[in-house]
Structures are given as C-alpha cells and as structure tokens.
Image (tube, helix red, strand yellow):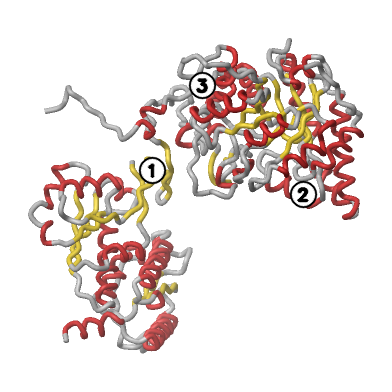
C-alpha cells in the first residue's frame, strides 16, 4: 500500500491559516492503514485546528469528511454538492488522492495534509517499510523475491557493495542490506550459484526516468 | 473511602484507559476543559495487559499537539495507581487542580468570549 | 595474458613484475597545483597513480581533469569512476574524454552513498552499477561501440580495473563476487586496505582454489596509520574495514610521536608478508593526505626502483 506520514501541524497551519471555511478530507484506504489520514486523523487535525484558530481569535469553520478513496471519480463525486461552500480543502489522502481531488474540483484550492513516501508493507503496527519503487520491469523472480531496486540504497543489480556490514547497509545500522537478504534467501532456496549470474543493465525507460506513466487496457475500457 | 477531592473535577469512567483516544482528549479541550488527566492502573498491572501503556503514548501525542496549537501540553497528564489507592487518587486530583489553577483557564474560553462580543 | 592496451601498468603486470600504484585525492577547489605537488612526491616510486572520484561523496575537483593533468606531467594516471553521480551517457562521455588524452587505466566503482558527503540531500544516479560499468568499458574497447550500438570514433584503449573488499560482509560471497567481476571483464583488482592479513590470505586462498589469481591481477591495498586515533577511527567508523585489535593495540602502545613510524612499519611488514602470497601481483598504497611517505614505504618494502618499460 502507499505509506504516508502526517505533516507537522505547524506546516498545515501555515498552508491554511488565511481560509475561513475548510474541509478536511480523509481517505479510508492506505492512509487509514498507516494511520496518517483516515477518519481518526481527520478528527484529530480538525479538533486541533479549530482550537488553534479560536485561540487566534479567528472564526474558522472546519468540517470533516472521509471518502472511501480519493483516487476514483465515483468516490470524489460525493463532494460534488458541498464542495463549493468551502474556500479550501485539506486532503489527507496520499499525493494521488490530493491531485485527483484537485483535478476533479478545478476551482477549489486543495492542500496536502500528509507527506506521501513509498509503496510498502506493515511490518507491525506502527512500522511500515518500503518494498517497491514501481520500476515497471519486475525482477523479483531473479532475486529470490527481494527487490534490490527498492531495498538497496544504491539500487545495485549486482550487489552487495563494499559497505555491507553484518547484514546492514552502510547508510544505517537499522537498514538491512538488501543483498545480504537476497544471498540468504538464495541459500535457503538452494540457488546460491545464481549469485554469479551477471544482471544486465536495466532499462529504466519504464520507470520515472521515462516520463510520467500511464497504463491503458483497451480490453476493459468502456 | 469518601475522601475529599476538588469539585472542579468531572470524572469520566472508562473500562480501561486504553479506551481513551487522542481525539477524546482534544475534544475535551475544544469544549472548554481547562485540563485533562488520565488515571490508569500501575504499569505492568493493566487488567487488559497494555491499555495503560497505549494511553500513556496517546497522552504524549496529545501534549505535542496541544503545544503546537498554543493551548499547552502541560494541561494533560497521565497518572498511574492501583484501584485500592484512594488516598493517592485524591492526591493526584489536588495536584492536577493546583497545576491547572496556576496555568489559568483554557485560552479558548476567553478567545470564544471575545469572538462572541 | 598479453597487453591489450598501451597501459604501462598492464605492461608491468604482464611482465610478471610486482606493480606499485598509489592514489592522490584532488583538492576541494580548482588549484591543480595540489595534484602537481602530490604527484611529484611519488613520481619515481609508483607505476600508476589513481585519482579518486569525489571520494566519500565529498565534492572535489573531478578525477578526469586531474588525470589529464597527470598525463601532461608525463605520469601514468588511473581514472577512478563511481557510478553514483553519472548516468550511462555521462559515464561513456567521460570515458571518451579520458581516452582523448590517452589515459589508459580505469577503476570502476560503486561509490559511497551521498549521505556521507557534503551533499546528503542530493540525488544519486546508479543508472548502471560498477559491475555493469566494467562490462561497458570492455564493450567500448573491444567492440568499439557505444552501449547504444553505434560505432565509436577512436575507441578507448583502457586497462579495466575494479575494487574488491575481502573484509566486507558477507564473506561467503566475496570470492564469488571477485569471480563475477572477472566475468564482467575486470583485468586488475585493487583491494580495500589490509590490516587483517590472515583474513586476506584466507580470501586469496579461496580465490586461488578457483584459479582466479591467474585470470586477474590482484593488487593488495595498504594504508599506513598516522596515529592510534586513526586506527580506532577506521576500525569503528568506516564501513567494510577490518582492523584487528592487536593492530590498534600496537599503534596505541607506541608513544604519540612514534606512532607515525609504527604505522609505516606495520604497512611495510604487511607488504613484505604479502609479497610471499601467491596471486598477489602488486600493491596499491593509499596514503591519504600523507603522500610524502609513499617513497619511504616503497623503498623499505624493497620495491624501489620501479621498472622502466618501453613505451
């Protein structure tokens, strides 16, 4: 899922401090799971902002709504009849949702309430880590199910580098060396000999480098 | 035990402090509470194992938010005691009341009054 | 193995003699005189001089410019190239830049993460990795083509090297990794500096068991300690470095003024011991900011004078 983190409240205040009718819009999916932008976080932010503005002597109306998703038009439609009464929307969805909301409601200022980080998984409640960077050419079959592009700090396809120490990456003792993980798994699978196969130069044109991406499925288009 | 504690305190019972959410704390202040304190079992003795530990972390979170918005994190605090310690409960109640009286009323109240004027 | 390039280093190694290389760190400014000075100190004591490439991600005068300068001084440069900062277009371009000035040695490296340097907020590139860079240079040299397939006008004639770190984890793949670099096309190896000679000899034995010592020229890396403090720092703070406790103790045991001499002594002993190690074809002396000691080390290790090779 997409993992995001709440923006510091000071930053949020700075973005919306001049508005008088604000809608805080949460999302029921990824940001709920990583506890950054779901219904509860919307409630907390709304309460905090209301108190802040009252304390500042400002009359600001702050409403709350949590949509099922903000990356599908059907769900964004729920706001169609009410959005014009607000002079700004603070969306706690991931960067995708914020943008889609902004595109759908072209004349409403939309502000992001979270910092979107990566595609990752829940290791345990409260800990989410990156697993995929969307390179567009999945090589997990060759690397024993561990991605060197998203988990190696240098995205080496023929790692590890000389900085790997006791299974940890040179940049942090808390970061596993992806290549140590790959080697351990190859061993487990009885495929350590595969290690010596030279991974070819990557085609990055399907990744961010190739430009903003789009998937079109003619077979399912209406 | 029928001990006396300050009557400025309104008690809200919960089955475990683990039920208290950051949102409840913030809403209390939003509605004009001058202080909020969360009283839970001694750490290690929570009937539901770690509800009181969760509560402590949420109180910390609430403190940070209250500081950031100018209400003041000192207005919320967590206390731990065992259910038999009636005297300690009264002590904590007095301590909290004194602290809040020192800090003065929730700034929101006067701000709201000024707005109404 | 017969020489395929005009590289002096390659010729010396192919003749069966021990090679000696060293390195110079470029300045954090545009004063090329710094390189002139360092290179002159070691001129007659080494066969080739590496110029580091923004080492530890600290921005410095680029390796290519300094290598061109060395060439103009009549010296033999080794261009160090990391894949952290340049994509495949820039890498190929800089290789041609080096080839234009007849620089014949290249060391292909990953590069330390930018987090360690002066621009931790910068992007990194890693378009291709060090293994793939080795392949790329060999391709440009042996096929005379760009990676994209077009012909290169006056292809580079470079002797291709790579780094090896027998002390990094996991140990069990350090020799397979050497084999991989050889398969990718590496022709010489410069290792990380050696303090744990036992471990290094263990690695060499595993390499010899696979016949790798005959497929690539391995140059053992050494760095003299200037002080006990430096020994401790390298032991604890530098990733991939193995400094045994006895070595630190030996440095700390010497009085402060004598520590530099002790460091040089350890370095010379290491070289002498490794001269006897089958498969070690030379030494790479990395005396960071202490280049003036290289002549002394080379002399005391019995490696002076350096062979003169016909051009």
The residue under the point 57% across, 44% down is A171
Kindly report the distance in space between the C-alpha atoms of the residues bearing marks 3 and 1. 25 Å
In this picture, residue A77 sits left or right of residue C171: left
Instruction: Specify the quadrant of the image occupied by residue B74.
Output: bottom left
Q: Is residue A69 visible?
A: no
Work out which quarter of the rendered image holds the N terminus of chain C and state it.
top right
Q: Nearer the viewer, residue C210 or C186?
A: C186
The reply to whether residue B92 is visible in this rendering is yes
Give how far across and how far down residue C220 sits, in percent: 77, 29
Coordinates of residue B9 in the picture (x, y in percent)? 31, 83
Q: Chain of mark 3?
A: A
Q: Residue tagged by mark 2? A: C230
Residue A152, position as x, y percentages in the image: 51, 36
The quadrant of the image that shows the C terminus of chain C is top right
Q: Which residue is mark 3?
A: A199
Q: Which residue is identified by label 1?
A: A118
Residue sitting at 67 percent across and 34 percent down?
A: C168
Disc 1 is placed on an element classified as strand
Q: Furthest residue to the top?
A: C2
- Picture quadrant where residue B32 is located: bottom left
Give me the disc on residue C27.
Answer: none
- Residue under mark 2: which chain is it in? C
Q: CA distance from mark 3 to mark 2?
A: 38 Å
Label 1 to label 2: alpha-carbon separation: 39 Å
Q: Is residue A93 above or below residue C61?
A: below
Residue at 62%, 23% in the rendered image? C99
Q: Are marks 3 and 2 in contact (CB under 8 Å)?
A: no
Number of labels in the image equals 3
In front: mark 1 or mark 2? 2
């Amino acid at each position: 899922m997409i993992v995001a983190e709440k923006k510091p409240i000071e930053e949020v205040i700075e973005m919306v401090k001049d508005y008088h009718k604000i809608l805080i819009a949460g999302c029921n999916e990824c940001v709920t799971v990583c506890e950054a932008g779901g219904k509860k976080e919307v409630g907390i932010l709304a309460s905090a902002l209301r108190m802040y503005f009252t304390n500042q002597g400002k009359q600001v109306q702050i409403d709350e709504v949590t949509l099922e998703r903000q990356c599908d038009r059907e769900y964004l439609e729920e706001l169609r009849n009410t959005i014009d009464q607000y002079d700004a929307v603070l969306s706690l969805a991931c960067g995708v949702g914020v943008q889609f909301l902004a595109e759908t409601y072209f004349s409403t200022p939309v502000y992001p309430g979270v910092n979107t980080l990566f595609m990752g998984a829940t290791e345990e409640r409260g800990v989410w880590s990156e697993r995929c960077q969307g390179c567009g050419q999945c090589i997990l079959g060759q690397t024993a199910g561990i991605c060197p592009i998203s988990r190696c700090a240098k995205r080496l396809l023929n790692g590890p580098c000389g900085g790997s120490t006791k299974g940890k990456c040179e940049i942090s003792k808390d970061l596993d060396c992806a290549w140590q993980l790959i080697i351990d798994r190859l061993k487990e699978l009885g495929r350590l000999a595969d290690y010596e196969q030279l991974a070819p130069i990557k085609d990055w044109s399907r990744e961010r480098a190739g430009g903003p991406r789009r998937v079109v499925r003619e077979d399912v288009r209406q | 035990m029928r001990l006396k504690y300050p009557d400025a305190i309104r008690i809200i019972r919960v089955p475990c402090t683990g039920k208290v959410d950051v949102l409840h704390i913030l809403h209390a202040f939003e509605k004009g509470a001058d202080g909020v304190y969360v009283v839970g079992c001694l750490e290690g003795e929570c009937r539901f194992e770690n509800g009181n530990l969760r509560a402590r972390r949420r109180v910390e979170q609430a403190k940070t938010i209250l500081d950031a918005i100018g209400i003041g994190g000192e207005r919320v605090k967590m206390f731990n005691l065992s259910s038999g310690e009636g005297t300690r409960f009264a002590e904590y109640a007095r301590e909290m009341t004194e602290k809040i009286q020192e800090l003065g009323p929730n700034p929101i109240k006067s701000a709201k009054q000024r707005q109404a004027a | 193995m017969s020489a395929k390039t005009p590289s002096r280093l390659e010729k010396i190694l192919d003749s069966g003699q021990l090679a000696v290389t060293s390195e110079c760190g470029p300045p954090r400014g545009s004063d090329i005189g710094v390189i002139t000075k360092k290179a002159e100190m070691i001129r007659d004591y080494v066969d080739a001089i590496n110029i580091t490439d923004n080492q530890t991600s600290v921005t410095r005068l680029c390796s290519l410019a300094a290598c061109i300068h060395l060439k103009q001084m009549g010296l033999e440069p080794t261009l160090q190239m990391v894949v952290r900062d340049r994509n495949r277009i820039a890498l190929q371009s800089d290789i041609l830049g080096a080839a234009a000035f007849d620089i014949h040695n290249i060391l292909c490296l990953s590069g330390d993460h930018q987090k360690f340097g002066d621009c931790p907020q910068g992007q990194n590139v890693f378009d291709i990795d060090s293994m793939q860079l080795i392949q790329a240079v060999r391709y440009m040299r042996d096929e005379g083509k760009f990676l994209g397939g077009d012909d290169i006008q006056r292809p580079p004639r470079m002797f291709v090297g790579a780094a090896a770190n027998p002390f990094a984890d996991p140990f069990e793949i350090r020799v397979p990794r050497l084999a991989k670099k050889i398969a990718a096309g590496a022709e010489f190896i410069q290792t990380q500096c050696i303090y744990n000679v036992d471990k290094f000899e263990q690695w060499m034995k595993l390499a010899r068991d696979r016949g790798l010592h005959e497929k690539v020229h391995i140059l053992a890396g050494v760095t003299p300690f200037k002080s006990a403090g430096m020994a401790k720092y390298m032991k604890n703070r530098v990733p991939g470095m193995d400094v045994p406790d006895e070595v630190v103790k030996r440095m700390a045991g010497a009085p402060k003024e004598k520590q530099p001499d002790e460091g040089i002594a350890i370095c010379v002993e290491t070289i002498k011991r490794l001269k006897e190690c089958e498969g070690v074809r030379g030494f790479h002396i990395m005396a960071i900011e202490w280049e003036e000691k290289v002549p002394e080390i080379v002399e005391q290790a019995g490696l002076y004078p350096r062979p003169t090779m016909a051009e």
